[in-house]
Image (spheres, grey):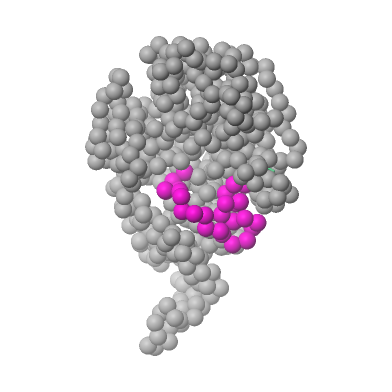
Amino acid sequence: MKYIEEFQNPDLAKRLLDEIHATVTRPWALMEVCGGQTHSIIRHGIDQLLPEQIELIHGPGCPVCVTPLEMIDKALEIASRPGVLFCSFGDMLRVPGSGRDLFQVRAAGGDVRVVYSPLDALKLARQNPDRQVVFFGIGFETTAPPNAMAVHQAARLGVPNFSMLVSHVRVPPAIEAIMCSPDCRVDAFLAAGHVCSVMGTGEYPELAERFRVPIVVTGFEPLDILEGVRRSVRQLEAGRHTVENAYPRAVRPEGNPAARAMLADVFEVTDRAWRGIGTIPGSGWRLSERYRAFDAEHRFSVEDVTTLEPAACRAGEVLQGLLKPHECEAFGTVCTPRTPLGATMVSSEGACAAYYLYRRLGGTPVPAAGKEANPVG
Amino acid sequence: MCLAVPGRVLDVEERDGTRMATVDFGGVVKEVCLEYLPDLQVGEYTIVHVGFALQRLDEESARRTLDLFENLGLLEEEFGDPWEAAASEPVVAAGSEPAAAAPATATATATATAAETLTREVGR
Ligand code: SF4
């Protein structure tokens, strides 16, 4: 796809950088909300190309990272039950619960499988009618509609042995929580492009107005990110705070109406705990009344499982942009992607993992083996 | 799992009452659910996340964005401070290549290095 490659064009990047350098007159802190953007930024060294006055703060946009310990423990509990076939996306396997992870549950004889799509989990349920098939439904607004479809199909096709452990999170309440934090340093947001592909931009004007903060919907290629930064800085320097769409090739103002309709049918808004941050009101989804029968928490009676987070890991501060990963004492020593202490190190999209993979201990970028097809978050 | 990847639709068919497509991600071919983009046609591009097409990739606006980047010099002329612009013009000695000229400001040096890094990075 030619134009996607063009979005990594160094000549155009230089022009954008020139423009940014010419515009900035004082320090600004920009938060990129999405983990995919964090990876693109670190991988291409974009933060190092920007004027010194511009600081990029990594936001809470990694769904694996923000899934609360409690939910992981519920997943581990369900996955260990006899007769259960537990499915999740691959990056959940190494996320540590309070004692172990899904990988270890599998090693101990649990049937834990990795699926690419929630529909694959549903397929497994239809192929194994004598088993209870449970899918771990995590993710932001981009992942929630596919997961909603799996539940909807299970109801439509009458698949009684399928259920979902739901831990979905929503971006706008997280932005609100970040802006309300007394330590907040964020001057502008680069909003997550693919979340907006689904939700559109309608939730943002109110936030931009209330907190007087520019919100620029931003894509994932290097040029996209530079354009997001350029537009944010222009607004900040001019004292404006509006919502702009810098990723129009994938984001319409109305988002994806079919996906939004399914979300509204299958899920309802609920308070949700974020790992390392705590409970944010209205920041999550759970199954709506109509689909409650497919709720794994209820089916396996794990509603009451509660856990406390370990004190050693500072992922909570990392997720709120208060601490850079390499400033954590455990970073790169006791805590590595192979022996992760916290979720921000375990997930390939976590900020700690991004720093570990591409930057090591805060020095120059270390190019990883080019395995990422297209860092489009 | 957070990745949403652009791909091209190879074929479309109804399976089990669900609209599905085969999508090519630069050589890797996968089954994709089209329920959220039911009017997507063969040959079109889409953004796919966990097996679902979530939004059409609009080539038209991709072009427009690239054109904008292409024209950024113009923007700078229009909105920038002309005095500053004149002051930061690199002084090019007659006969020498512009690329060999010493950058006039610290900013120019920073951006040049920056662009080199990016060239290295994206050129891999
Ligand atoms: S480096 Fe490890 S211990 Fe430190 S904040 Fe990141 S995940 Fe937690």
Where A147 sits versus A349, above or below? Answer: above
In the rendered view, does B100 fall on the left or right side of A77? left
Q: Indicate the position of residue A87 as horizontal and vertical percent values.
A: 50, 26
Q: Residue at x 62, y 26 (%)?
A: A108
Where B45 sits versus A24, above or below? Answer: above
Q: In what quadrant does ligand 1 lie?
A: top right
In the rendered view, does A43 fall on the left or right side of A100? left
Q: Does A364 appear in magenta?
A: yes
Please name the predominant secondary structure of the magenta segment in the image. Answer: loop
Where A39 sits versus A195, above or below? Answer: below
Q: Residue at x 56, y 58 (%)?
A: A366
Q: Residue at x 57, y 23 (%)?
A: A110
The answer to whether residue A369 shows anywhere in this view is: yes
Q: Give B116 or A343, whichever is nearer the viewer.
A: A343
Q: Give the mark count.
A: 0
In the rendered view, does A100 fall on the left or right side of A311? left
Q: Indicate the position of residue A344 as horizontal and vertical percent values.
A: 62, 41
Q: Of all residues shown, which one is farthest toward the right?
A: A311
Q: Quadrant of the C terminus of chain B?
A: bottom left
Q: Give A79 or A14, whichever is nearer the viewer.
A: A79
Q: Give A154 or A79, whichever is nearer the viewer.
A: A79
The answer to whether residue A190 shows anywhere in this view is: no
The quarter of the displayed image where residue A302 is located: top right
In the rendered view, does A66 fall on the left or right side of B99? right
Q: Which residues are magenta?
A: A351-377
Q: Indicate the position of residue A355 as horizontal and vertical percent values.
A: 60, 51
Q: Residue at x 65, y 41 (%)?
A: A340
Q: Give A146 or A56, whichever is nearer the viewer.
A: A146
Q: Indicate the position of residue B96 as horizontal and vertical percent values.
A: 40, 85
Q: Does A252 appear in magenta?
A: no
The quarter of the displayed image where residue A149 is located: top left
